[in-house]
Image (cartoon, rainbow, N blue to C red):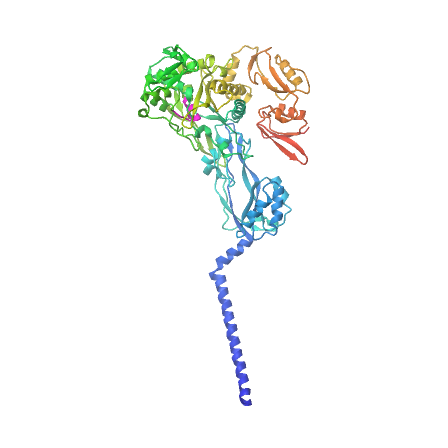
């Protein structure tokens, strides 16, 4: 190429390069503009959402769950403020530091928490722990990590812990009802869920933001129950004692007001603790979900049907066949107490299977079925509790002659304890069956009445005169029959014992029984119907030996509580009929022998006990609340205790419990006054103290 060509080519190359550069820059500028348009307009929402994830969070906020109260207004379940911890795995700096700090306050293990965090790396919100008490959460305030999120939440708290736990039910970690009243009325109790927009600030805390996505949570309604917490506590305490002493697998106590249908107490064993969260099976509401064959307690229903139909009367004679009867199909019916010719009253008092089998045959399948159905067997009571069983009541055409005979003494029929209580309540209420209920009122958060439940009559099952005859016959069961262990001097009681074999693996067991007693008090005009039931007792199989004493102790304990005496005034009326030389036995458990002796001296009672300042009264007979003559002797069991295990604090008067703790040198804090409902240990540094929970909420320290 010549020099002239080279000189002319160089400017052309430069010009072409400049044009190329301009084109490239123009394309880049166009690409940037397009990207800006795409990001700022087309994909604006997506990028804005990603940006918001870095500095804000939208948290669902549950409304404050409504309170549960007993019939006197005592709070049973409420909501308390707690701290919940969450984590943003994408922003956390030191997951190990957080995990070990949480482990130190006893919430969860560090290894488990680190594994959860590692499995949630692609998420922006992971719960660490819910419902941590405020005092424990304060230990984490020094952690300054942008990935740690602290939220204040309301957690369900059951003030008296295990009291009526199966009936009240419980909630899950998100505050949703999963059992009992909590489940049945979950929608009303939990209120309206709101949404809160939060902005992340220092140390992982969230600060509320006001925008159009924030909505207010509304508190739930409160429920007032028919339950009587004082009576419930007595029922639970005595039931636990009976289950322990008889070796029973489980037990139930129901207390019903026969004139209104109000459920006053519903105690279960094994007990369920809300603080320990023990087995789900312990939370089962056996009184309405479990069925059993009523056995001899069904004889009162057969007697009522026979009296109402004119097929029998209290003095009519029946042949007891000497205690053994063979059916046409070869099965044997036996009596534990052989009888010859006897009246219907005697047959009921001594619980003759043979007489009531004959009575069922005379009534016929259709008539017996009709009365059983009218008393509520085979029909749900429709009480406001979840999971109620219907029971088993076979149609007349399904009963062969042999089955009808066995139905006469409570076999081949199944019911829930609540159905049995309602049937006896009809006998106590002059033959009128009432619908049972456990909810009295539902109140809005501002106190306005939403709903009120009132007594509801279902039907007149038998005439009042017949009901009175049956009650008179049942009174003889307690006075001279199988129920003498339920007798209380000065208080007329009507009731019936039951001992039913359980059906196990295709046959009736010779070892497993259901022992029961259903009592009315007072017999003349019953104010209460009490069902006591023990599942598979081992010390003795008979209801008269196991369930009847439990009934008696419950009534005696009620007599010793002034608030119950005032609430159920018949106790006072019964006492007033006695001479002025009678006195109620005081509760001296937890006192020293010298202190107990001074109390008895003031009431003109005697006790044979060594006067020692180192001996504590652990048990007494007659029981506290019993009515005895002045100058009567009270037997005291004493011990030189060194731990709380030697004297159960639950049920003691608060003053006695405090004195006992001081005797052992244990610091104690008392919440309220009255009788101890529950207690727990609390550690303060190297020292432990006992927290006693009683009737009222006022708190005071009694530091030794």
| Left or right placement of residue 391 versus residue 281 in this view | left
Q: Does the magenta-highlighted stretch encompass residue 52?
A: no
Percent position of residue 685, x then y: 67, 36
Q: Which residues are magenta?
A: 413-423
Q: Residue furthest front?
A: 330
In this view of the protein, which residue sits in the foreground, 444 or 20? 20
| Left or right placement of residue 111 versus residue 459 in this view | right
Percent position of residue 96, x then y: 61, 48
Image quarter hosting the C terminus: top right
Q: Quadrant of residue 583?
A: top right
Residue at left offset 62%, top offset 39%: 135
Residue at left offset 61%, top offset 44%: 102
Q: Is residue 420 visible?
A: yes
Residue 320 vs 116, above or below: the answer is: above
Residue at left offset 54%, top offset 20%: 557
Residue 130 vs 428, above or below: the answer is: below
| Left or right placement of residue 52 versus residue 500 in this view | right
Residue 635 vs 22, above or below: the answer is: above
Q: How many marks?
A: 0
Secondary structure, magenta segment, majority class: helix
Residue 336 vs 154, above or below: the answer is: above
């Amino acid at each position: 190429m010549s020099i002239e060509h080279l000189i002319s080519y160089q400017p052309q190359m430069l010009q072409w390069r400049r044009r190329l550069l301009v084109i490239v820059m123009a394309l880049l500028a166009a690409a940037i503009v397009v990207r800006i348009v795409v990001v700022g307009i087309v994909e604006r929402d997506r990028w804005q959402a990603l940006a918001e994830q870095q500095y804000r969070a939208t948290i669902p906020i549950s409304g404050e769950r409504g309170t549960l109260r007993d019939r006197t207004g005592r709070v049973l379940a409420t909501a308390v403020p707690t701290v919940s911890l969450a984590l943003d795995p994408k922003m956390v700096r030191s997951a190990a530091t957080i995990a070990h700090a949480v482990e130190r306050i006893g919430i969860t293990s560090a290894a488990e928490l680190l594994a959860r965090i590692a499995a949630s790396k692609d998420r922006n919100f992971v719960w660490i722990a819910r419902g941590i008490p405020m005092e424990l959460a304060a230990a984490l305030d020094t952690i300054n990590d942008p990935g740690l999120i602290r939220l204040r939440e309301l957690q369900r708290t059951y003030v008296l812990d295990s009291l009526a736990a199966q009936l009240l039910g419980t909630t899950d970690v998100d505050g949703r009802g999963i059992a009992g009243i909590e489940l049945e009325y979950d929608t009303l109790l939990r209120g309206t869920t709101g949404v809160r927009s939060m902005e992340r600030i220092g140390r992982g805390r969230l600060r509320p933001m006001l925008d159009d996505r924030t909505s207010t949570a509304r508190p739930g309604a409160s429920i007032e129950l028919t339950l009587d917490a004082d009576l419930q506590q007595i029922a639970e305490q005595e039931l636990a004692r009976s289950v322990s002493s008889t070796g029973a697998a489980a037990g139930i106590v129901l207390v019903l007001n026969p004139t209104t249908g109000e459920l006053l107490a519903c105690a279960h064993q094994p007990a369920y603790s809300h603080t320990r969260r023990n087995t789900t099976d312990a939370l089962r509401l056996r009184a309405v979900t479990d069925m059993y064959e009523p056995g001899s307690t069904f004889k009162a229903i057969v007697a009522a049907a026979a009296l109402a139909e004119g097929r029998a009367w209290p003095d009519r004679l029946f042949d007891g066949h000497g205690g053994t009867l063979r059916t046409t199909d070869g099965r044997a019916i036996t009596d534990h107490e052989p009888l010859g010719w006897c009246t219907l009253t005697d047959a009921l008092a001594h619980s003759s299977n043979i007489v009531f089998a004959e009575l069922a045959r005379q009534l016929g399948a259709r008539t017996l079925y009709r009365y059983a159905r009218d008393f509520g067997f085979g029909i749900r009571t429709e009480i406001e509790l979840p999971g109620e069983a219907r029971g088993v009541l076979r149609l007349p055409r399904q009963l062969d002659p042999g089955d009808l005979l066995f139905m006469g003494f409570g076999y081949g029929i199944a019911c829930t304890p609540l159905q049995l209580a309602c049937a006896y309540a009809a006998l106590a209420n002059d033959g009128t069956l009432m619908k049972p209920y456990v909810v009295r009122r539902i109140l809005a958060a501002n106190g306005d009445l939403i709903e009120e439940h009132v007594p509801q009559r279902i039907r007149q099952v038998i005439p009042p005169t017949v009901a009175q005859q049956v009650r008179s016959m049942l009174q003889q069961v307690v006075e001279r029959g199988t129920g003498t262990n339920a007798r209380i001097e000065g208080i007329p009681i009507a009731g019936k014992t039951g001992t039913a074999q359980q059906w196990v693996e295709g046959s009736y067991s010779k070892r497993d029984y259901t022992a029961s007693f259903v009592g009315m008090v007072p017999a003349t005009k019953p104010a209460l119907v009490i069902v006591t039931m023990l599942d598979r007792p081992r010390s003795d199989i008979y209801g008269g030996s196991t369930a009847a004493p439990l009934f008696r102790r419950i009534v005696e304990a009620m007599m010793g509580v002034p608030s119950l005496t005032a609430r159920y005034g018949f106790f006072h009326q019964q006492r007033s009929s006695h001479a002025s030389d009678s006195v109620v036995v005081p509760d001296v458990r937890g006192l020293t022998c010298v202190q107990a002796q001074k109390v008895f001296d003031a009431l003109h009672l005697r006790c044979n006990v060594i006067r020692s300042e180192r001996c504590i009264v652990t048990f007494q007979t007659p029981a506290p609340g019993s009515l005895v003559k002045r100058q009567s002797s009270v037997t005291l069991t004493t011990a030189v205790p060194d731990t709380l295990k030697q004297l159960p604090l639950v049920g003691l008067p608060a003053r006695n419990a405090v004195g006992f703790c001081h005797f052992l040198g244990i610091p104690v804090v008392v919440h309220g006054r009255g009788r101890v409902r529950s207690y727990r240990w609390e550690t303060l540094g190297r020292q432990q103290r006992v927290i006693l929970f009683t009737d009222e909420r006022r708190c005071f320290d009694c530091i030794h």
